[in-house]
Each structure stands twice: as C-alpha cells, then as structure tokens.
Image (cartoon, coloured by chain):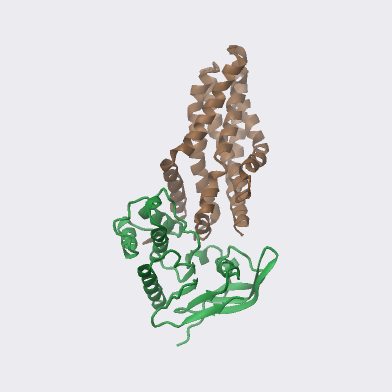
Chain colours: A green, B brown
C-alpha cells in the first residue's frame, strides 16, 4: 500500500555564499521510506539537510511537513523530527549518561536513569555510562550522540554522516535501528559515503550534482 | 518517557549550565577574582584619604562589575556553538527564547550574583557606611541582570566572528551606561542623605524591560548566526 508522503520538498534551490548548490530539487518521503542523499564533497548534502531542519532558508521553493510549510509549523515540527549533524552536540565535561539526559531534555523529554542507561547499553557503551565523555574515543562519542535516537518518538530522522568514526559492529547496529524505526512508520533521510543496507527496505537515492 | 514542560526546559538549561560551570570552575573564578583585583587596586593607587575613597566607591565598584561581566560574555554561546549543542537547542520543541532566558539566568547566577555578594567586603576598603553597603548590594542585584541580558544579545550577534570578544564589549558597554549611572547614583543618593528609591526603581524597570525583550532579540540573533 502506498502511504501518503509526510515530507514534501517542492522545487527548492539553495545557495552557499553566492554559489548556487542545487536548484529545482523535488522529492517526497512517506512513512517507512529511507532516502540516501549522495553527491561529491561540496555538492550541498549538509545544506540540504539543514534546510529540512529549517536552519537555512531555501532561496526558492519550500519544504512541507504534513502539507504545511515548515516555517509555519514553528516549534511543533521540531517535536516530530530528530537531527544529528556532523557535530555530536555532547559536552566533554559531562558523563555519557548526563549528556544523554541533557540532549533528551532539549528534545523535550525527561528520561530516568534506567532508561538512559538502557539506551547507552544498546549502543554498546556498557560500563562507560558514568565516565566523562572526555576520555571516550571518537567512535564512542558518536555512539553517545546516536543514543539520542533511541529516546523519543520523532517520525523523521535527519542524519548527517551518522556512520563517521563507527566500527563495523556499530554500523550493523545503526542498520538495525533504522530498520526498526522504518517498520514503526518512521522516515529517515541520511548522507553517508559508506554503504548502508537496511534489510527489507529499498533505499531511495537522491543524487546531488 | 515524559514530555518536558516549558518551565521544565528552562530549569534543565539552567541546571546544565551550572553543572558545566562546576566542572570547569576556573572560568567562574576568573570573573570574581578580576572584580576583586580591580576594586582593590583603587585604594592602593589613589591613596588612603577616606573622604575621597568614600566618594568614588560606588563608581569604582560599578565600573569593575561592568568590566568583569564582559569577561565571561564571549563564552556564553560559543562553546555550545562549537560542539553543535546550539543546533539542538534550536530544534527544541519550545521557543528558543526560553532556552536563551535559561542561559541568561545561569550566566547571571555565575557572573552577576557572586559580584553582588562579595561587594560589601570590598566596600569596606572604601570606608563605606553600612547603609551605603546595603544599597550597593541591592543596586547590584537589580542592575547586574541587565548586564547579562544585554550581553546575551551582544554575544549572540558576534557569535562565530573573529575577535568577537572585543567586539562584544564595544557593542554592549555603551548600552550598559544607564545601568552604571543609576546603579552608582543609588549609593551617591544615600551618601548625600537622600532616598535611593528612585534610582533603584529605575534599575528595576530596566531589568523588567530587558527581561521582556532581550531573550527574544538574542534568539533572533542566534538564528541569523546559524545560517
């Protein structure tokens, strides 16, 4: 059964400085769909994802969520999405557990210690929960940031290079998490230079040039 | 998993900033020690004439407080900007102004409140009367929040710029002049045998006015600097 798309990108064009990155871009994303944005370095992948978040205003066209422009949605749209950028948004001084609780709080959720610990364990951070993030490796920091995906009920995941610094095991775990998210009626749009296959789901490709 | 209310989010931001400050205490102590040093240098440099010291006391304390509060301003948003937390704050399902207000309150607790609390000790070096000391503390408590609030706008506007630290002082200090005038004026009035109520009332009015407008303006400035 074909689901009605929730995210619609209508004829958008984006610029960085005076340089036109892409124009006339159209696509839609329906529940259960997975989309990979591809393109060379500097082709505007990150800018596209930031436009979907509302950080960057497109020069032309519009982004709609449930039929309404995301500019008009205001803060309610933010409750429906989860964005994970290049930067991990975690603090060196705080422990993994504190970091997760704070970032969950910023996303509007209160999580108990048990819930947060469970999410961190799922991400493979056993016995690292109370260590300051300062002493963790890059890959482990990325896992702390990714643990945020396990908290909350956002429909739309926007992931910018989620697999950076992750080992094979963690990449497998991410595939599993995205698969679960999609089967629960979620949507994911992501960029990566590594292959990411989610079983049972056809990955849609979007090529920026 | 429960949803966080507006005040829950405000509390979370304040708690988070205070916790971070406790983990790197040096930043907080710098402001306080700078304030103590600057104020203490004046009696040494000007000489031990009680009459003159008493006259200049409130002005010196206020100017030092103004400069001390500038010290920590560039750090207000820059760390969150650098590690991506600011992006997540913008994606919070509540208004960004509320989060900015939380950061302002945390900043004041760490930079304005300690100054007001230690000011009476420093005032003793200037031979200030007990009544003048009380008014000084009261004026600082009413006035320093304005410095944090106007400072937040300046810090947000200069976010990500090179040399932003100096720029923010140039931007914010002129706007803080009214606070300086009425803050120092309150103590002057008491020394002159008059009531300080009008000065304090004006300081309170500034604080309320800034409380209404600055979080919103700073939030808009942050949005611009994120593009």
* Quadrant, the C terminus of chain B: bottom right
Residue B173 visible here: yes
Residue reaching furthest to the bottom = A1
Residue A83 at x, y percent in the picture: 49, 65
Q: Residue at x 53, y 53 (%)?
A: B82
In the rendered image, residue B68, in percent from the top left (x then y), is placed at 56, 33
Q: Position of residue B87 (x, y in %)?
A: 53, 58
Between A49 and B218, the one nearer to me in the picture:
A49
Q: Residue furthest right?
A: A18
- The quadrant of the picture occupied by the N terminus of chain B is bottom left
Q: Is residue A126 left or right of residue A189?
A: left
Q: Is residue B89 left or right of residue A177?
A: right
- Give the image quarter of residue B179: top right
Identified at 33% across, 57% down, the residue is A112
The residue at the point 44 percent across, 43 percent down is B18
Mark count: 0
Taking the image as drawn, is residue B195 in sight? Answer: no
Q: Position of residue B56 (x, y in %)?
A: 62, 20
Front-lying residue, B128 or B189: B128
**Above or below, B111 relative to A107:** above
Q: Residue at x 44, y 45 (%)?
A: B20
B96 or A97, which is in the foreground? A97
Residue A104 shown left or right of residue B124 in the figure: left
Query: Up-down: is B73 above or below A139?
Result: above
């Amino acid at each position: 059964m074909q689901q009605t798309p929730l995210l619609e990108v209508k004829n958008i064009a984006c610029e960085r400085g005076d340089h036109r990155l892409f124009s006339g871009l159209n696509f839609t994303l329906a529940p259960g769909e997975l989309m990979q944005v591809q393109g060379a370095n500097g082709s505007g992948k990150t800018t596209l994802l930031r436009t979907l978040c509302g950080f960057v205003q497109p020069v032309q066209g519009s982004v709609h969520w449930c039929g309404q422009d995301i500019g008009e949605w205001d803060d309610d749209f933010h409750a429906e999405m989860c964005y994970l950028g290049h930067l991990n948004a975690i603090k060196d001084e705080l422990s993994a557990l504190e970091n997760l609780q704070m970032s969950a709080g910023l996303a509007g959720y209160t999580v108990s210690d048990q819930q947060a610990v469970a999410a961190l364990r799922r991400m493979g951070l056993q016995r690292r929960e109370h260590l300051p993030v300062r002493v963790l490796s890059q890959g482990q920091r990325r896992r702390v940031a990714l643990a945020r995906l396990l908290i909350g009920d956002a429909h739309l995941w926007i992931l910018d290079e989620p697999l950076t610094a992750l080992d094979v095991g963690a990449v497998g775990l991410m595939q599993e998490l995205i698969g679960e998210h999609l089967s629960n009626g979620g949507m994911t749009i992501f960029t990566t230079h590594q292959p990411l296959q989610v079983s049972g789901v056809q990955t849609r490709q979007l090529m920026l040039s | 998993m429960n949803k966080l209310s507006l005040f829950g989010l405000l509390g979370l931001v304040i708690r988070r900033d205070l916790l971070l400050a406790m983990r790197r205490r040096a930043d907080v102590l710098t402001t306080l020690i700078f304030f103590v040093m600057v104020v203490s240098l004046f009696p040494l440099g000007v000489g031990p004439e009680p009459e003159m010291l008493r006259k200049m006391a409130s002005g010196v304390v206020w100017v030092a407080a103004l400069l001390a509060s500038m010290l920590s301003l560039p750090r207000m948003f820059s760390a969150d900007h650098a590690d991506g937390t600011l992006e997540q704050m913008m994606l919070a399902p509540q208004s960004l102004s509320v989060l900015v207000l939380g950061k302002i309150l945390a900043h004041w607790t760490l930079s304005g409140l300690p100054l007001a609390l230690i000011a009476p000790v420093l005032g003793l070096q200037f031979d200030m009367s007990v009544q003048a000391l009380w008014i000084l503390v009261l004026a600082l408590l009413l006035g320093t929040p304005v410095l944090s609030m106007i400072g937040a706008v300046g810090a947000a506007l200069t976010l990500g710029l090179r040399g932003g630290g100096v720029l923010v002082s140039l931007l914010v200090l002129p706007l803080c002049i009214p606070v300086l005038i009425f803050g120092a004026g309150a103590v002057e009035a008491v020394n002159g045998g008059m009531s300080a109520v009008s000065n304090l009332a004006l300081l309170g009015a500034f604080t309320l006015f800034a409380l209404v407008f600055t979080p919103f303006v700073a939030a808009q400035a942050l949005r611009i600097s994120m593009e």
